[in-house]
Amino acid sequence: MIGLGTVIDVALLIAGGLAGLLGRRFITPRVQDALLKASALCVLFIGLAGTLEKMLEVTNDGLASGGAGMIIVSFTVGTLIGEFLNLELRMEHLGEWLRDRFAGDSENGFVDAFVTTSLTVCVGAMAIVGSIQDGILGDYTTLTIKGALDFIMVCAMTASMGRGAIFSALPVAVFQGTITIFARFIEPFMTEWALSNLSLAGSMLIFCAGVNLIWGKIFKTANLLPSVIIAVLWALVRGA
């Protein structure tokens, strides 16, 4: 069944969030803080590993780096677009709307938990590639693996940040579901180079989300999201 991958991913994400929420009641604020730092460390290194994997190449002379020009252009243009659209503010408004209806003003950090977790689990090559595989081939293997990873990540983030993290299931369902529906139209444009650029830009955004978890809101990560699209366009234009 086409779309089953996103259903499985969202179900595992919600299950992880509920497990974290139940566990949160039995752990102290000190342990919650430790879980937050542990989650942030994982996010940082997931983003860093994905970035280095795409930028570094082993040659006979040692390590060679590439992709610098692409990321400079992508993040410069993407940031200008994101700041103009103010995507971060729109995500915060969505988080506030969800908080007002499902949590009330009593829960501090709901919006930050929602925005940070959403960006962590939405941005990445697995979400894109898995959704395309699901939409074209009905193969939900990649999204199932992603769901297992999301279960662990959202469980820890919910335990440390609160129930706002669970509502990251909403943008995941919309984002991956939309890609799955339009997969047949997207497939011709998602060349190997385009997917590589997407993975590189996405990994950098995940790293930014990890930085924000540890040091506070340094990056407006949502405003950097258009950089992923520019990275894909770069590959299509250069490959034409």
Image: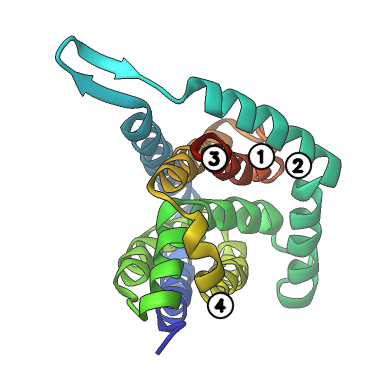
Q: Are marks 3 and 1 in contact (CB under 8 Å)?
A: yes
* Amino acid type indicated by mark 2: Gly
Q: Which residue is mark 2?
A: 82
Q: Which residue is mark 1?
A: 224
Q: Is residue 30 visible?
A: yes
Query: Residue 103 at x, y = what percent?
Result: 71, 72
Q: Is residue 203 above or below residue 89?
A: above
Query: Residue 101 at x, y = what percent?
Result: 78, 76
Depth check, mark 2 against mark 4: the one in front is 4
Q: Residue furthest left?
A: 60
CA gap between label 1 and label 4 equals: 25 Å
Q: Which residue is mark 3?
A: 205
Q: Is residue 210 visible?
A: no
Depth check, mark 4 against mark 3: the one in front is 4
Q: Are marks 1 and 4 in contact (CB under 8 Å)?
A: no
For label 2, the SS is helix
